[in-house]
Image (cartoon, rainbow, N blue to C red):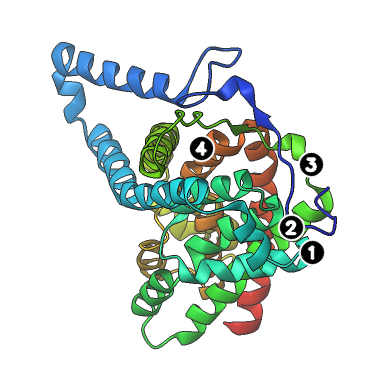
């Protein structure tokens, strides 16, 4: 199906996920349930053990959690707004006209389209989901998902500011990130299966409703749906982030291979927004430029926040397959580009 002649593809929509968010699975647990449980625990601790909330590790956790969520929220709202616009205002025939009919050619075109969207990975996930719903082949939508947060002008300018006098770092990030997006799109064209995508069915528009009403309802649905997974991902990033001592990083910086792997893993667990990650990478001066490039390439493609958003948008089975392969491809391409350009 994904290797055919047309850019339009059929994707399975999971009827069990109708309405706001994911319908209860076998365990009956949703991301919003986890959020409610977290809030309840914090309220109980505030009254029963207020001193526990003043511990340094708790304060550090809350700082990281709030920073991740607040940093990502504006871009998530942007992505949801674009997603709702694509789903309700743009006719499906538009994508058939602007994208090449052959998926192999549609993938690099979709990847380059990410250059014009100034947003982070939180924005690209709902947009990619909306593109798939509108009939765009998943390979092209996934290429856009990976490229948009890494090669847009805002990210490239931030990288140039973080690495003054090192334009090769900007070029390396652009080439490596776009390469990851295109390679993953082509891999999906060759190996992807439609049943791996479990898109939630959007609410059915009310009869006689205006386009604005349909747009508002679609945006509300996606915001609640993706927002819950953003919070879960932010909590995971905060939990893992406070458990990584800085001394461990300094100890592995001298090993080229280990440095690349450690910074790749750090990018996954810290879940820093792509508009800000260059400044974090620039501060890791004990690491090589190639290792720091890996940090910049892996972060916008695979992090705990992004994995949670992908699971909420495309289904857990998709995220369980897509994220590990993307991580391997990102590390390999970043290492190769770094060896050539840095």
Mark nearer the N terminus (2 vs 4) = 2
Tell me whether the residue at label 2 lies in contact with that at label 1, contact meaning CB atoms closer than 8 angstroms: yes
Q: Nearer the viewer, mark 1 or mark 3?
A: 1
Q: Nearer the viewer, mark 2 or mark 3?
A: 2
Dot 1, how many residues are within 10 Å of its Cα: few (below 14), some (14-19), or many (20+)? some
Question: 14 or 226: which is nearer to us?
Answer: 14
Which residue is under mark 3? 193
Which residue is under mark 2? 7
> Where in the figure is residue 22, as x and y percent of width and height?
52, 24
Q: Which mark is residue 166?
A: none
Q: Nearer the viewer, mark 4 or mark 1?
A: 1
Tell me whether the residue at label 2 lies in contact with that at label 4, contact meaning CB atoms closer than 8 angstroms: no
Mark nearer the N terminus (1 vs 3) = 1
Q: Does 252 appear above or below 62?
A: below
Indicate left or right for 7 with 283 as reference. Answer: right
Dot 3, how many residues are within 10 Å of its Cα: few (below 14), some (14-19), or many (20+)? some
Tell me the residue at 53%/12% (across/down).
28
Which residue is under mark 4? 308
Q: CA distance from mark 4 to mark 1?
A: 31 Å
Tell me whether the residue at label 2 lies in contact with that at label 3, contact meaning CB atoms closer than 8 angstroms: no
Determine whether the residue tagged by mark 4 lies in a helix, strand or loop.
helix
Determine whether the residue tagged by mark 2 lies in a helix, strand or loop.
loop
Q: CA distance from mark 2 to mark 1?
A: 6 Å
């Amino acid at each position: 199906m994904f290797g055919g002649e047309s850019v339009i593809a059929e994707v399975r929509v999971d009827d069990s996920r109708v309405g706001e968010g994911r319908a209860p699975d076998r365990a009956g647990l949703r991301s919003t349930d986890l959020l409610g449980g977290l809030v309840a625990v914090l309220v109980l601790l505030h009254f029963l053990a207020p001193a526990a909330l003043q511990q340094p590790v708790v304060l550090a956790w809350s700082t990281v959690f709030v920073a991740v969520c607040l940093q990502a929220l504006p871009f998530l709202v942007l992505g949801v707004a674009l997603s709702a616009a694509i789903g309700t205002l743009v006719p499906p025939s538009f994508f058939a006209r602007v994208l090449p009919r052959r998926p192999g050619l549609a993938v690099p075109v979709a990847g380059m389209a990410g250059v014009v969207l100034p947003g982070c990975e939180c924005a690209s996930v709902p947009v990619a989901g909306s593109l798939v719903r509108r009939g765009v082949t998943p390979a092209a939508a996934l290429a856009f998902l990976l490229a948009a947060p890494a090669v847009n002008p805002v990210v490239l300018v931030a990288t140039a500011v973080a690495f003054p006098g090192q334009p090769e770092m900007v070029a390396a990030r652009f080439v490596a990130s776009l390469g990851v997006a295109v390679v993953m799109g082509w891999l999906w064209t060759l190996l992807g299966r439609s049943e791996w995508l479990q898109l939630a069915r959007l609410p059915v528009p009310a009869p006689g409703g205006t386009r604005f009403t349909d747009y508002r309802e679609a945006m509300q649905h996606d915001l609640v749906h993706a927002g819950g997974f953003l919070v879960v991902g932010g909590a995971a990033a905060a939990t893992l982030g406070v458990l990584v001592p800085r001394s461990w990083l300094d100890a592995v910086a001298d090993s080229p291979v280990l440095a690349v792997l450690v910074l790749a893993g750090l990018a996954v667990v810290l879940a820093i927004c792509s508009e800000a990650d260059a400044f974090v990478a620039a501060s890791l001066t004990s690491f090589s430029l190639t290792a720091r490039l890996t940090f910049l390439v892996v972060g916008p493609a695979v992090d705990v926040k992004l994995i949670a958003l992908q699971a909420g948008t495309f289904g857990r089975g998709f995220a369980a397959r897509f994220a590990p392969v993307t991580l391997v491809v990102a590390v390999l391409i970043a290492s190769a580009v770094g060896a050539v350009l840095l």
